[in-house]
Image (cartoon, coloured by chain):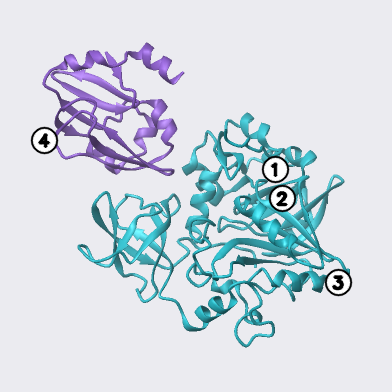
Amino acid sequence: MAEELRRTGLYDLHVAQGARMVPFAGWEMPVQYPMGVMAEHLHTRDKAGLFDVSHMGQVLVHPLDGDLDSAGAALETVIAAAVLGLPEGRQRYGLFTNERGGILDDLMFANRGDHYLLVVNAACAEQDIAILQGLSGVKVTPVTDRGLIALQGPKAAEVLARLLPAAAEMRFMDSRSLDWNGVDLWLSRSGYTGEDGFEISVPNDCLAAFAQALLDHDEVAPIGLGARDSLRLEAGMPLYGHDMTGDVTPAAAGLGWAISKARRADGAREGGFPGAATVLAELADGVSHTRRGLRPEGRAPIREGVQIFAEAEGGAPIGDVSSGSFGPSVGGPIAMARIPVDLADGATVFAELRGKRMPVTVTALPFITPSYKR
Amino acid sequence: MLKYTVDHEWLRAEGDEIVVGITKHASEQLGDVVFIELPEEGREVEAEEEVVVIESVKAASDITAPVAGVITAVNSDLADNPGNVNDDPMAAWFFRIKPASLDVLDSFMDEAAYGELIG
């Protein structure tokens, strides 16, 4: 029998909003509301969307010796990003890697003064926590009494400032605590849509009340996982398990930028994470294939697994689609695929769909222009 | 009178042809339809043969021929406006098929039986 699905603190709210609930990474999550994926997507780009991302793993990492750099140094042995040097109140993107240099998960980590707050993918949380618990000199605390809400869109800051005026002062990738009626909220100005917005960690016993306080504003609509996927795809953001896996290195996933100079060859803290030799060699020497955008010429979406060819007939595949769907704001199908780096933007390649090869154009990512408040 | 298939198609007899679309229930399950590929007119098909590709924002699926016959017409307007399937599924017909005999319709569900199927 299947394992029982977990429910977030917003389950009742989702049901009351008419959500269609689906299993996702062991959780029962809203895939869409009566508005529908297309309208939810466009609403987020136009106004503000409220997302329940409570399924994601929140983990605190404290140094045992009270020196945050001890925890930062420990994290740098498992995360291919610069953790040390991240200023207090700032957040950064990182990657857990394996011994082959493949990606085990992607995450956000924030310096919260005396500890780091990590946010990891739901499907990888158990694995990530086990990795972190293997580190010495740190105390690892999975956060089980909080949910996570994302408020995304051009109206997100304006709406949130009505509840939390200080939120408006935050810049992109800032991380801080704010008080809401005596409740300690942990905010970051970030998201997974390409829009300005916030991710807000809320104690479970106040989660529904806080979500409702946001939904009470006309600009805010609840948005499901369906639109979350099309929004992040348009924003050129990779999804773990699809655009990156344990078999895909940072360079091949188009995520080399996440590894800052300090951790690269000849950097102050070169390597020292799993698979570093492979990862750093690829960053220095380049890779043959990496994640690129694709735009089919017709209306037919090309989805994950569709093979890409250089020619309209014959030849071996040059890559396959890792994420693909319809982009509501783009107004047509869009996809990402690992294909040769030497193909120029604008080049035509072919996607084999139902036995026919359809022309698709290699396109720079993202498909839309992000509007972060830097 | 409308008939229904277990694949959530509606069938309407007109003359010696059957007009085929998908039900409201099916369109709701699919979500926003973004792409439709229709068969060629004049194509001879077997029952259960895949004739229409329909893609929503979520997934690709197909529509099969409910009966054997010849595709006599397709609603090419749908290819340009796939969202019509969500807006008015009972008006958004996909194709017309001419079977050897309309008696084949007797084997499909009526509205009451279909209503029971989808609960």
Q: Are marks 4 and 3 in contact (CB under 8 Å)?
A: no
Q: Chain of mark 4?
A: B
Q: Which mark is residue A214?
A: 1
Indicate the chain coloured cyan by its letter.
Answer: A
Q: Report the residue marked by disc 3.
A: A67
Q: Report the residue marked by disc 4.
A: B42
Q: Nearer the viewer, mark 1 or mark 3?
A: 3
Q: Which mark is residue A160?
A: 2
Give chain B's shade. Answer: purple
The amino acid beneath tag 2 is Leu
Q: CA distance from mark 4 to mark 2?
A: 58 Å
The amino acid beneath tag 4 is Gly
Comes first in the chain, label 2 or label 3: 3
Q: Are marks 1 and 4 in contact (CB under 8 Å)?
A: no
Q: Residue B79 sits in which quadrant?
A: top left
The spot of residue A268 in percent (x, y) is 69, 85
Single out the residue that lies furthest toward the bottom: A266
Q: CA distance from mark 1 to mark 3?
A: 37 Å
Q: Which mark is residue B59?
A: none
The spot of residue A1 in percent (x, y) is 57, 33
Q: CA distance from mark 4 to mark 3?
A: 77 Å
